[in-house]
Amino acid sequence: MAFQVQEFRAQMTEDGARPNLFQCSLNFPIIATNSSASTGFASGQGASRKFTFMCKTGSLPGSAVSHVPVFYFGRELKFAGNRQFPEWSVTIINDEDFIIRNALEKWMSGINSHYSNVRNAAFTQGDGGYQQDGTVIQYGKTGKVLKKYNFVGLFPVDISPIELDWGANDTIEEY
């Protein structure tokens, strides 16, 4: 089979989608953005806006449909199961104000506090609760929105450590 590069090029009519043209947004619960003397955290007000700029990596969501194995006379038959979604991960650039990090830590502490091992009573379902919404948008080279995904009911399950290193010159923290 002869390979014709012109045929491939003819199929790439829009010059390919670029992975660096995206924007992520995340709503934070009220409790995660208010100052609290008891936590010692700085105010997280503006965390949602800042997140849009400091979110360095994200992903368009994946999904999988599981299968249900059923055996019949020693033979395995597979039937479609339920849709499953993997965790949505982002990488955040850390600024010296720690606004986003503080808001995420307060959010997780409200879900399950370090000290008392209970959920904050303000973290119920609905507005202001621990489950919030987020969005990821993929843009084209002209700025046109190519794809938009809305995430419903997000909450943090893991905050990565920030590595500290005396030899890490000319770098900015991220997690």
Image: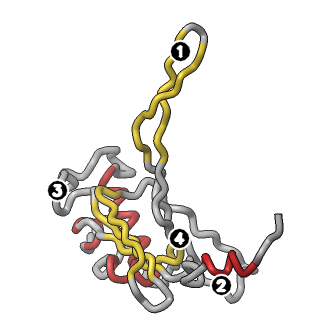
Residue behind mark 2: 171
Q: Is residue 11 left or right of residue 114?
A: right
Q: Quadrant of residue 106?
A: bottom left
Front disc: 2 or 1: 1
Res. 126 mark: 3
Asked if marks 3 and 4 touch (Cβ < 8 Å), the reply is: no
Residue behind mark 4: 91
Q: Can residue 40 be seen from the camera position used here?
A: no
Q: Residue furthest right?
A: 2
Front disc: 4 or 2: 4
Mark 1–mark 3 distance (CA, rounded to whole Å): 43 Å
Q: Amino acid at mark 1?
A: Phe
Q: What element does badge 2 sit on?
A: loop
How many other residues sit within 10 Å of disc 3, few (<14), some (14-19) or many (≥20)? few
Q: Residue furthest front?
A: 1
* Residue drawn at (35%, 57%) of the image: 155
* Residue drawn at (27%, 48%) of the image: 119
Residue behind mark 1: 71
Front disc: 3 or 2: 3
Q: What element does badge 4 sit on?
A: strand
Q: Nearer the viewer, residue 84 or 76?
A: 76
Q: What element does badge 1 sit on?
A: strand
Asked if marks 3 and 2 touch (Cβ < 8 Å), the reply is: no
Q: Earlier in the sequence, mark 3 or mark 4?
A: 4
Q: Nearer the viewer, residue 159 or 20?
A: 20
Mark 3–mark 2 distance (CA, rounded to whole Å): 39 Å
* In this view, 159 is above or below 164: above
Front disc: 1 or 3: 1
